[in-house]
Amino acid sequence: MEAKVNAPNVLIVDDEIGPRESLKMILKPNYNVYAVENGYAAIQMIQQTPMDVVTLDLKMPGLSGIDTLKEIRLIDPDLMIIIITGYGTLKTAIEAIRYGVFDYIPKPFNVPEILSIIDKSIQRRKLNLKVKEVLGNCFHQYLLQEPNSDSAIPLPQEAKGFSDFKWDDANHSDNQNCLEFAKVLAYTLEEKDPYTSGHSERVCYYSDCLSKHLSFSPKERNELQIASYLHDIGKIGISNRFINKKGILTPTDWAIIKQHTKKSIELLVPLNLSPNILAYIQYHHERYDGTGYPDGLIGEQIPLGARIIAISDSYDSMTSDRPYRKPLTNGDAKNELVKNAGKQFDPRLVSLFLDVLKEMEEVFLVKDHLRVPAVSY
Ligand SMILES: [Fe+2]
């Protein structure tokens, strides 16, 4: 087979000749397609030829799909795996999701669906590798750290690792890629801490709802989404001892925690993000009455996106479980927002946020806790 230069490599693993050959035909125009009929051959093939995506049938004689999956993961943890499953194996397919498969497609498959899923998996793989490269330079130590480690990561010198990743602000598709990159980066970091898992995604969800009510342009919405995902990225440079401390924080503890906005900017500046994104991140702890940090900005001196994130971030933090306290109910969290309108928060935005919450309550409220949906790729 003559390989197409720069085309991703896809391996089809299926014991049935029908689906194997039809998949081959479907994928051939866009990818370098390889096909094998069992798990052993798949493992051998992956060891010889680096693959980007594997489509894996679960029901195969010899090595089962799940066992093949486990073996593949040992060889290449970054490989995108898509399960193709027939009737009756759906339960196993769901089990397979636990082994980090990208998606599953029921048989018989339809062409647009499979092409779309493979394309998404390739995009995701590119982002994963990009994040990993950045992480390799910058966050490697963080990821290797025990979750309860006390030591902080020295950031400024490490931030040089970002310099190869610049986004073209004028280019819309680059903005979309940047958002996907921000998501993967935030997820990768949040995975380490069950208490913050999903936080940036929910902050983005709430902020985005507000921005829609404020008639933001698509570009402004995109910037706010990116900033929402990355707003606390600098916390990786702060020891967990301070972030998750139970009990009262001393003035020294606070001084250290407050550094996270500065550290976020140190990390992100080399990425060439738009100045708006950086400003939203930098000022998301400013308070409307001027008593916030880092610069003590007052009222509308604080960028609108930062005032929005301040509300989304606080609402989600208050209603989330933390090592040092139980989550507040939706009602109690709303009372806190109202109590702090004009002090911590922009009062106009608090009132708008309450309207947004009211709409959400009709759909997502369970025992006075909002269960907002996960935003998928
Ligand atoms: Fe923060």
Image (cartoon, rainbow, N blue to C red):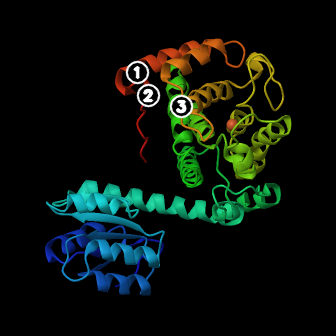
Crowding at dot 2, Cα within 10 Å, few <14 / some 14-19 / many 20+, comes out as some
Residue 242, picture quadrant = top right
Residue 133, picture quadrant = bottom right
Say which residue label 2 marks.
Answer: 370
- Which residue: 27% across, 73% down? 65
Q: Position of residue 297 (x, y in %)?
A: 81, 23
Q: Mark 1 touching mark 2, by CB under 8 A?
A: yes
Is the CB–ligand 1 distance for label 1 below 8 Å?
A: no
Residue 170's place in the image compared with 45, above or below, is above
Badge 1 element: helix
The CA span between labels 1 and 2 is 7 Å
- Which residue: 35% across, 72% down? 69
- Which residue: 32% across, 68% down? 29
For residue 353, which numbered disc appears in the image? none
Q: Is residue 341 left or right of residue 93?
A: right
Residue 223's place in the image compared with 47, above or below, is above
The amino acid type, in three-letter code, at marker 2 is Leu
Q: Earlier in the sequence, mark 3 or mark 2?
A: 3
The CA span between labels 3 and 1 is 17 Å
Q: Nearer the viewer, mark 3 or mark 1?
A: 3
Residue 252 visible, this orientation: yes
Q: Position of residue 60 (x, y in %)?
A: 20, 76
Say which residue label 3 marks.
Answer: 327
Q: Position of residue 3 (x, y in %)?
A: 40, 80
Q: Is residue 137 left or right of residue 118?
A: right
Say which residue label 1 marks.
Answer: 361
User: For this rendering, which residue is in front, 121 or 263?
Assistant: 263
